[in-house]
Structure formats: C-alpha cells, structure tokens
Amino acid sequence: MRGPLRIWSWPWVLLYLRHEVLALPGRTAILLFVIFLLLFPLFTQDPYWLRVLTLTAIFALYAASWDLLSGYTGQVSLGHAFFFGLAGYASAILGRELGLPPWATIPLGVLLAALVGVLVGLPSLRVKGPYLSLITLAFPMITLGFIFLFPRLTGGEFGLSGLPRLGQSRLEEYYIVIFIFLVSFLILWKLGGSRIGLVFHAIREDETAVRMAGINTVRYKLLAFGVSAFFAGLAGGLYAHFLRIAGPDSLSLFNSIQPIVWSVFGGLATIYGPVAGTFLLFPLLDFLRVVEEVRMAAFAFLILLLMRFLPQGLVLAVLERLEEECPRCKVRNAFTRRRCRACGVDLHLNPSAEFRR
Amino acid sequence: MVLAGVLVNGLVLSGIYGMLALGFALTYGVARVLNLAHTAFYMVAAYTLFFLVGRVGFVEAAFLATFVVVALALCAYRLLLEPLKQHESTVLIVTIALALLLQELLLLLFGGQFRSVPALLPGFVEVLGVRVAQQALLALGFAAGVLLATWLLIKGTRLGLRIRAAAQEQEAAELVGISLSGAGYWAVGLGGLTAALAGLAVAPLANLEPHMWSPSLLVVLAAVVLGGLGSLPGALLGASVLAFAEVLVVNLVPGGSFLRTTVALLVMVIVLLLKPEGLFGTSFVEER
C-alpha cells in the first residue's frame, strides 16, 4: 500500500518529468537547453566559446526583460538601452568613486535602473501607443547628449574602462552569468504565467476593458516598467563588468533595437521566444565575423527574409508544428500523439469529414 | 547678428526636415506603415546623386536618383511591408533591417569616409548681414517649392482627396469606393518622392556618410510625433520647431553640437507630456 505522492519527492519528480516535461517537445527542448548550458564547460573551455555564450546569456536576459514590458504589456519601448546602459554606468561610477566591488555596485545600479524604470513609466499613464514608444526612444538619446557634455564624470565618448571583473577566470564568470540568467529567466517566465502576467496580457489587448473589470491598470503598468527595467539593468550591469567597459555604445539606438529584433524573431509575449531568438541570432552574428565586410548586411538580409515569411516569430512557428492543443480540454500535446494525453479525445477528429460520413 | 544666422539656418533646416517629416507622415497616415527606413531612402537618394553627378549632368542625375528611390520605396512596400501590415512590431523590425541593409550596402560600395557633392551654385551672399551659401538658399527655395507642390496635390486634386479620405477614416473611404491599397501605393510613392527630394537638397550641403540616416530619423520621428502622428500640417510645424531648437542650441550653448538631438527629443517629451496627442493630434490612438 503506497501513501499519497509527496510533492518534490523523487517519485513525484520522475513522474512529473515523464508526464509534464518529456511529453511535450517544447518543454523537452528547454530542459535540454538548460542542461546544455550547465554542462557546456565539460566539453570545451575554449575562451572564445565561453565568451560568446556568456554574452548571449546576458543579451537573452535583456531581450526577455524587453518582452515582459513590450510583448506582454504592450508598452512598446524603443529605448530599452536606457536601463541597460544606465545600470552599467551607475555600477562603473559607484565602483570608481566609492571603491566598491562589483557584487555591491551591480545591485545598486540595478535598483537605480528599476527606480528610473518606474519614472519612465509615469508618462505611460498619459501617453499611449506609438507616442509612448517615441518618448522611451528619447531617454537614452538625451542621456547620451549629457554623457558627451560631461566627459570628466562619464568618460565621454570612450566610456569608463578597466572595471573590476565579475570573477577570477572566464569559467567562473561563465557560471556566475549563466546562473543569474537561468534564475531571472525562471522568475520572468513564472511572472508571465501568473495572474500578474494575465493582467499584463489583458492590458495589451484592451486596457479599457481591464479598467472596467475593476483592475488598477496604473499599478500594473508601473510594475511592468519597474520589473522590466530591473532585469534590463541586471543585464546591463553584468555586461559592463564582463566587458570591463561602460561606454556610450550601451546607450545607442542600435542597442535599443537589438532586444526587439531578437524578441520579434523568437516570438513575442512568451519570454522563452526572445531567449531562443537571442541564442540563435547572437552566435550567428558572431560567426559571420569570418566575412567581416558583409556581416551586418547578411544579418539584416536574413532578418528581412525570416520576418517576411514567419511574421509571428520563428519559435512560435516551429512550436505550432510540434505541439497542438486538444480541442476539448485545451491541454497541449506533442504532434505525434493521436489521442489527447489528458482526456483521451481523438486529436485529429475532423468535424467536416464526420459530417459527410 | 547671431539671431539672423539662427533665422536663416533654421529656415533651411526646417525645409529639409519638413520634407522628410511630410513623407513620413503621409506613409503612416495613409498606408499605416511606421517606416523607419524613411531616412535611409533619403540617404540613398543623396548617395545616388553623388555617384551619378560626375558621370551625367546634374539634372539627369537628380532625376535618376529620384526614380531609383521611388522605385525602391514602392518595391519595399509591395514585397515586404504590405503583406506584414497586420503585425505592427514586425513592420518595425523589417524597416529597421531594411535601413541597416541599405547602410551596409552603401558602406560596401562607397566606404565609410565623408563624401560631398559639389554645390550647384557655389559662392555666398549676404542676407540680413549673415554670409549664407547660395546653395543653402537654393535648397530653401527648392524645399518651399516641393512643400507647396505637395500641399496643392493633397488639397487641390481628386487624388489628394482620395489620400486624405483614406488617412481620415479607412472604412468610410472604402465604403465610398476609394481603393485603400491604391491610396496606400500613392502615399508610399509620394513619401519616397519627398524623401528623395530631401536627399537631393541635402547632398550638396552636408557631408554624406552611411550612418547619416539614424540622427535624422530621430528628428523626423520627434517632429511627426510633436505635430500629432498622421497630421500633415502638424508634421511640418513639428519639423520647423525642432529645426529651430537645434540651430539655437548649436549656436548659443557651449558644447551645443553634442546636444543637437538631445534638445529635439527633449522638446518632444515636454510637448507630449503636456499634450499627449501632439499639437495637431487626431484620435488615431482610440482606433481598435
């Protein structure tokens, strides 16, 4: 006689793995991806590969933070580099002026970014749609002007270089960044799937209706701005200390657009879409260094083609073919199954064929 | 003295920004495409002029450059943007990618160094006690002519009526028998045309380099938003407000050239915070 299955006991974990993770191609892919990231240094410790993967993880976090604000909540930010760059600069200046180590300055920079995120969110209470996007676009550009105006404090166009490193070796830095990335990814994903995430979705679709339902959208929009800026700042702080420079490039228009490209490429409002998009595109952009002259042109051309033919994003398009929703109970199933794994109904039941027969 | 300089330079710059902003507003208002590659088109026109001007005469070169850019705009709209109109964020990515692609192609073809086109009218004249290049005055006249012609086209012809109707209320326009896609093509073509003409006007005045599209894109976006997205007079007013703000800052503030775009954007933010739908805002935002 067996007792009830305790949650987080071994048998429970194994059953969960078999029925909830391995049963779906998408979740299996995420499990394999996490295992791959954690075990990667066992196969090779080539500094080039560690560097590329570390940078990719940082940018994936950045793209995911953009997705929470713009994909979920629909407040399209064209100036996300503001939070990214600000946290980097704040961490660099605090480290230089107060002599604090990175593990103290990065969190301070991140908190500053989150605070500023809420402040940037304040216009979103009055200004909507494309107008809001363009206001967010303005902030990094305005800051950039002041950075060039006060080179004494900010290092001007060369930026602040020689920041303290994150860890002693490339390997240590890799694990620090990967660990922070995975934890943040999990938090963002769970947040997106929670009740708060549901409200975010609803605000994007129809804000008036959400207000009618008695939900304080102001609070939720500011929350989205704050959380998104928090994680963008985290990525920015890690980036500055990994490359050991906080420069004006981190505030450039290109850096604001990068997370948008990756997110739209992967698939909006999914959190895993932007992460997958970054992990596909960023290393690719790096490989294209072998043909340095046409690198950006090839990259732009590729994005043009992909977006033209897969406008809803690559990951969503692939996932749509690999998984399908049960018509009766809405549980997702692998494409190989004939019957739903939860309710047993025939998945490929074609109503029109039935009718004809 | 300084004031006169500000006035003259501000007018020239307003003319150029005005042409760009007008084309951008037309494309957005009628075809509903936020075309971030708009200033890349203008850059392509300037470069084509630079490439052709030694080989054929100036007038032929100008016509060819205009033709190239209008064709480019129409092709991009037909092949890339029209099928994607439903996905607004995808349109943003595609137009940015297009701008980057054009930038990289120009970088491959012409290199990253500054280029310039010889002035059509060399020499200077005194206006209000300021030495002004004759070329700048020519550009100002040209811009005024283009803006006037566009205004006549929009306000005075049946085509203009169709375009305005499509911009104002898409469904009602379709109900009275206006082809939305036809109006969209006309608007994109006109947008490309004004971008090309702005490129021609700017080529002899400024240094050409493959990154010149992004600062002017910021100003155009700011101008269009300032005036209210989709409003043509608003776009023109926004463009001249920003042009004068830019010229004032560059002339009066020490280190002002760093703050060029900063000030333009600051003006935009302040106006939007006070009046969220822009100066001449229509109720686009309420559409669902």
Image (cartoon, grey):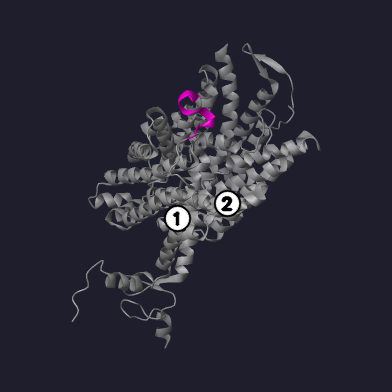
Choose between B197 and B115: the one closer to the eye. Answer: B115
- Identify the residue under disc 2: A285
Q: Quick check: A307 left or right of A136?
A: right
Query: Furthest residue to the bottom?
Result: A357
Query: From mark 2 to mark 1, how far is it between C-alphas?
Result: 15 Å
Q: Which mark is residue B42?
A: none
* Residue A171, percent from left and from top: 47, 51
Q: Chain of mark 1?
A: A
Q: Chain of mark 2?
A: A
Q: Which residue is rendered at x = 30% and y = 78% of the image?
A: A343
Q: Where is A182 relative to A349, above or below?
A: above
Residue bounds of the magenta highlight? A149-162
Q: Secondary structure at mark 2?
A: helix
Taking the image as drawn, is residue B180 in sight? no
Q: Quick check: B180 left or right of B141?
A: left
* Residue A59, percent from left and from top: 47, 48
Identify residue type, mark 1.
Val
Choose between B74 and B113: the one closer to the eye. Answer: B113
- Identify the residue under disc 1: A275
Q: Where is A7 relative to A238, above or below?
A: below
Any magenta on residue B253? no
Q: Quick check: B60 left or right of B132?
A: right
